[in-house]
Amino acid sequence: MGYSSFNLKPVFMQKVAILSGLLMVKQNYKYMSKGIHLFFLLFGLSMVLTAYKGLSQPKRSIMKLPVPDSSGLRDGQHDFDFEIGTWKTKLKRMVDPLSGTQTWVEYEGTTVVRKVFDGMANLVELTADGPAGHFKGISLRLYNPQAHQWSLNFANMRSGVMTAPTIGEFKNGRGEFYSQETLNERAILVKFVISKITSDSCRFEQSFSDDGGKTWELNWIAVDTRMKDGAGN
């Protein structure tokens, strides 16, 4: 027998309580002394009144919790459309971040950005050279339509390993993305910012924090300028 067999209606149970109270008064009245008569009479009547009060009260409506509305979130699927194509890249990076030193190296090269997954993602290929040597990296950017956020997944060819994705979104023409990584066995926060976006140029900055985001140290700056003769897919 399932639990549903015992799911009696509240109104029915209240009526049963009324009848039970009246029956108790009737059945016990003739067997007891006057004092006990009075006790059972009052007890039975109290049951009747309590049950009747429950019948007379209006049914309470069940409160429904509001369903979160995500329709107000901006669709950011096309946030990176401005970058599709081929760009000349000037790159500057700090050699040893969060070490107290301020040694920077510079590179120049080319960045190619292509749409993949019907625009729900894009693939970035960066190739650059400078006094510090040859640099080659790749970034896969994926859009999450439920969260309305992007994840940026970067790897350089020297390690061949994807870093932890930085996740975020664009607001007012500025993209901010965050992640947690390790540097020299210490947990750090990473912030990646895309700003100064025009049809022909944009700026990328990366910063690290080892104090929970209270302070940030800039360690990567890249400025891209569109190559007019370049082509991207």
Image (cartoon, grey):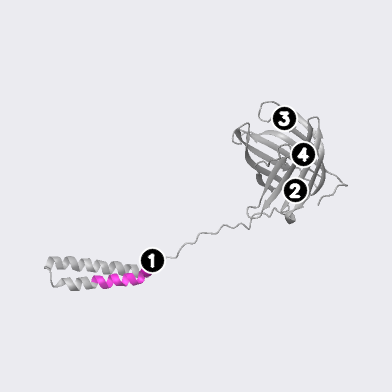
- Residue that carries the numbered disc 1 in the rendered image: 3
Task: Report the quarter where the N terminus lies.
Answer: bottom left
| Secondary element type, mark 4 | strand
Amino acid carrying label 1: it is Tyr
Q: Position of residue 109 (x, y in %)?
A: 82, 38
Residue 136, numbered label: 4
Q: How crowded is mark 2: few (under 14 residues within 10 Å), some or many (20 or more)?
A: some
What secondary structure predominates along the stretch shown in magenta? helix
**Which one is closest to the eye, mark 4 or mark 3?**
4
Between residue 144 and residue 163, name the one nearer to us.
163
**Which one is closest to the eye, mark 4 or mark 2?**
4
- Residue that carries the numbered disc 2 in the rendered image: 123
Marks 1 and 4, the one that precedes in the sequence: 1
Q: Are marks 1 and 3 in contact (CB under 8 Å)?
A: no
User: Is residue 221 left or right of 6 when viewed as pictured?
Assistant: right
Marks 4 and 3, the one that precedes in the sequence: 3
Q: Position of residue 93 (x, y in %)?
A: 74, 33
- Residue that carries the numbered disc 3 in the rendered image: 95
Amino acid carrying label 2: it is Leu
Amino acid carrying label 3: it is Val
Q: Please determine whether, in this image, residue 30 is positioned above or below residue 129.
A: below
Q: Is residue 94 magenta?
A: no
Distance between the alpha carbons at the discs numbered 4 and 3: 16 Å
Would residue 84 be visible to someone looking at this image?
yes
Please report the residue visible at 31 percent of the width from the left and 72 percent of the height from the top.
Answer: 15
